């Protein structure tokens, strides 16, 4: 069933639409990509019998990584293929890379993709390095932020900030200030503090956040969490909750601990939103999917109805998008998730490799996106080509055959711009942030001189070095390449064309 | 240990000195009866011995990312790579290079069979 202008009746499912107080068997209708009233349908309307399934508004995952060093080659594999109709890229780009993000991904996914850019101009660096070094904030170009936000209405849904260390609490306040200037929620990451011993800046996040701001990774088990040493919810956390700060699961690769979640649950500290933080480093386990994270919340004691609320109307409210998503109100886009709840013994694993047995799980089966039916494929994301980014060092990727004359010429010029820049083998201990900015600047200089579209320039570089279409900040990508190998391959491509000419 | 010449995987007979100084016998590890991955040592280095197809490969026991045990890691990419189950960091068994985690390197060891004995040495 492709999206059609004709009406369609979805019949017999158990509908859960917490935003409208619906929880029971009833019919839902769509037409021309929108939800429509069931009344008035023609007698010969196309009908899909969903008896035995659940049907809900399309799920919203407000924390994923489809772009950047944590992203996927196949972004829809964690979106519409898994019942998620809208998601937010949580911090992959910053103001210095939002143009690259848009050039690569705008309009390229069936899943509606929003951005929650990082306060750092380059976006998330990933892979440990210097994520907490405040110097990587460099400058905060307020005018650029305002101009971009105005030029792309509805794209930005929050400003993401990590709990930076080393310079007091200023960085958190800068993030809050920027969010206020842009009239967006602050989305604060409080995890990964095992990598930053002594950094207590997350506590300041609880203090600076206001009603409507969101704290993610609420149940992480590392330092600087929501519990005190006796396992009690910290007063500063409880105060934040009381004044309307929202707490989000953000399962992640390090940030969901059964021990913490169970203790919080026992004290009545529940999440306001469920998100997955799906990325290259958790999709093959233990996160797997938003449905799996919802199942984990049910294991903790959450009802199915509440789990649905926290992936539909709750994130829609938090992202200020109830006019376009989160419920099945007639007139809204026909974004719908159909799923089963399968019974049977399963094991649920947290990010510390602790497990819990459970006897049911949520299994998405059909997604409707703007009325188009997509049959779910929960395994598609598991393909290692989707999450294992590797440089094609010993062969030439197929994508090289697609290069246009203009792209090849660009690569030749780019090699010339990069040649005077020395960069070392990638180091775990340090990241030459300044060098990544230099490489990015050389890329843009070559692109402007050759006058080719940004997307063409970006894909030219990726197609020369990657078998699969990953997307990331070009400065960071070039930095992770072996310099000698990278220059040699780009020169070889360019010289081959000159010989042909 | 037999001192009779024998074909030793992955080297053709005669192409590799059988007991050159840097090869070390992995004591107590019977290639036919041991369960793999199996723990062993090369000098002071604690290693895991993996069965790769008809052959073997050794790696250090902990992931260089956060020092988590690799005993339940996954073979990946046609058994040419090892994936730590904790954070899905993937390492190439040929040389230990971190594939999706640039800068990280896993220590890898050549492991060969000599009749009923396994021998190992650090991969160059």
Image (cartoon, coloured by chain):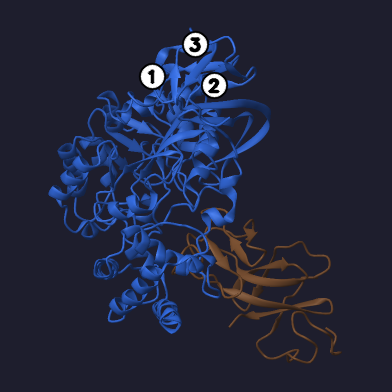
Chain colours: A blue, B brown
Residue A358 placement: quadrant? top right
Q: Which residue is mark 1?
A: A331
In the rendering, which numbered label is found on residue A38?
3
- The residue located at (58%, 27%) in the rendering is A339
Residue A436 placement: quadrant? bottom left
Picture layout, residue A152 above or below residue A125: above
Spatial CA distance of label 1 from label 3 is: 12 Å
- Local secondary structure at mark 3: loop
Q: Which residue is mark 2?
A: A55
Q: Nearer the viewer, residue A428 or A138?
A: A138
Marks 2 and 3 share the same chain: yes
- The residue located at (58%, 9%) in the rendering is A43
- The residue located at (50%, 71%) in the rendering is B105
Q: Earlier in the sequence, mark 2 or mark 3?
A: 3
Q: Nearer the viewer, mark 1 or mark 2?
A: 1
Q: Residue furthest left?
A: A143
Q: Nearer the viewer, mark 2 or mark 3?
A: 3
Q: Nearer the viewer, residue A466 or A353?
A: A466
* Residue A459 placement (x, y as % from top left): 41, 61
Q: Chain of mark 1?
A: A
The answer to whether A319 appears left or right of A337 in the picture is left
Picture layout, residue A224 above or below residue A393: above
- Local secondary structure at mark 2: strand
């Amino acid at each position: 069933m492709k999206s059609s202008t004709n009406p369609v009746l979805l019949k017999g499912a158990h509908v859960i639409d917490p935003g409208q107080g619906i929880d029971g068997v009833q019919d839902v209708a769509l037409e021309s990509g929108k939800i429509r009233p069931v009344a008035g349908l023609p007698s010969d309307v196309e009908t899909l019998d969903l008896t035995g399934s659940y049907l809900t508004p399309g799920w919203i995952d407000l924390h994923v990584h489809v772009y950047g060093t944590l992203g996927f080659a196949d972004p829809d594999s964690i979106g519409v293929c898994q019942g998620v109709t809208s998601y937010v890229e949580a911090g992959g780009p910053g103001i210095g890379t939002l143009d690259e993000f848009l050039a690569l991904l705008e309009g390229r996914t069936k899943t509606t993709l929003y951005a929650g850019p990082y306060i750092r101009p380059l976006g998330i660096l990933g892979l440990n390095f210097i994520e907490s070094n405040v110097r990587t904030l460099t400058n905060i170009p307020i005018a650029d932020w305002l101009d971009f936000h105005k030029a792309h209405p509805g794209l930005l849904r929050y400003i993401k900030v990590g709990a930076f260390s080393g310079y007091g609490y200023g960085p958190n306040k800068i993030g809050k200030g920027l969010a206020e200037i842009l009239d967006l929620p602050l989305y604060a990451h409080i995890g990964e503090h095992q990598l930053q011993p002594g950094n207590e800046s997350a506590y300041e996040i609880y203090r600076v956040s206001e009603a409507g701001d969101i704290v993610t990774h609420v149940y992480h088990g590392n330092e600087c969490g929501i519990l005190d040493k006796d396992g009690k919810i910290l007063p500063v956390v409880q105060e934040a909750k009381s004044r309307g700060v929202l707490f989000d699961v953000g399962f992640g690769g390090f940030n969901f601990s059964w021990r913490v979640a169970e203790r919080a649950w026992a004290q009545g500290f529940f999440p306001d939103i469920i998100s997955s933080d799906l990325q290259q480093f958790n999709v093959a386990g233990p996160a797997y999917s938003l449905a799996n994270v919802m199942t984990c919340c049910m294991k903790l004691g959450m009802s199915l109805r509440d789990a649905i609320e926290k992936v539909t109307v709750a994130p829609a409210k938090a992202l200020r998008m109830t006019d376009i998503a989160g419920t099945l109100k007639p007139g809204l886009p026909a974004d719908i998730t159909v799923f089963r709840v399968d019974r049977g013994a399963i094991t649920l694993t947290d990010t510390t490799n602790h497990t819990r047995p459970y006897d049911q799980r949520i299994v998405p089966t059909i997604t409707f996106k703007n009325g188009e039916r997509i049959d779910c494929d929960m395994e598609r994301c598991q393909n290692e080509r989707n999450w294992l980014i590797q440089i094609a060092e010993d062969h030439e990727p197929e994508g090289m055959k697609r290069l246009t004359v203009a792209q090849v010429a660009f690569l030749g010029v780019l090699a010339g711009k990069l040649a005077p820049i020395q960069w070392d083998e990638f180091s775990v201990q340090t990241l030459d942030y300044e060098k990544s900015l230099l490489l990015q600047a050389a890329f843009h200089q070559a692109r402007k001189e050759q006058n080719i579209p940004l997307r063409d320039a970006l894909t030219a570089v990726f197609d020369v070095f990657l078998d699969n279409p990953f997307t990331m900040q070009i400065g960071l990508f070039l930095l992770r390449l072996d310099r000698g190998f990278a220059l040699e391959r780009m020169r070889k491509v360019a010289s081959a064309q000159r010989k042909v000419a | 240990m037999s001192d009779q010449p024998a074909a030793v995987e992955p080297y053709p007979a005669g192409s590799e000195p059988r007991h050159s100084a840097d090869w070390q016998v992995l004591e107590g590890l019977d290639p036919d009866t041991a369960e793999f991955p199996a723990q062993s040592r090369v000098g002071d280095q604690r290693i895991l011995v993996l069965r790769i197809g008809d052959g073997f490969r050794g790696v250090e026991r902990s992931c260089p990312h956060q020092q988590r045990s690799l005993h339940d890691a996954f073979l990946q990419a046609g058994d040419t790579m090892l994936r730590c189950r904790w954070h899905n960091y993937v390492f190439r068994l040929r040389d230990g290079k971190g594939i999706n985690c640039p800068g990280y390197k896993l220590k890898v060891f050549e492991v060969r069979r000599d009749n009923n004995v396994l021998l190992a040495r650090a991969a160059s």
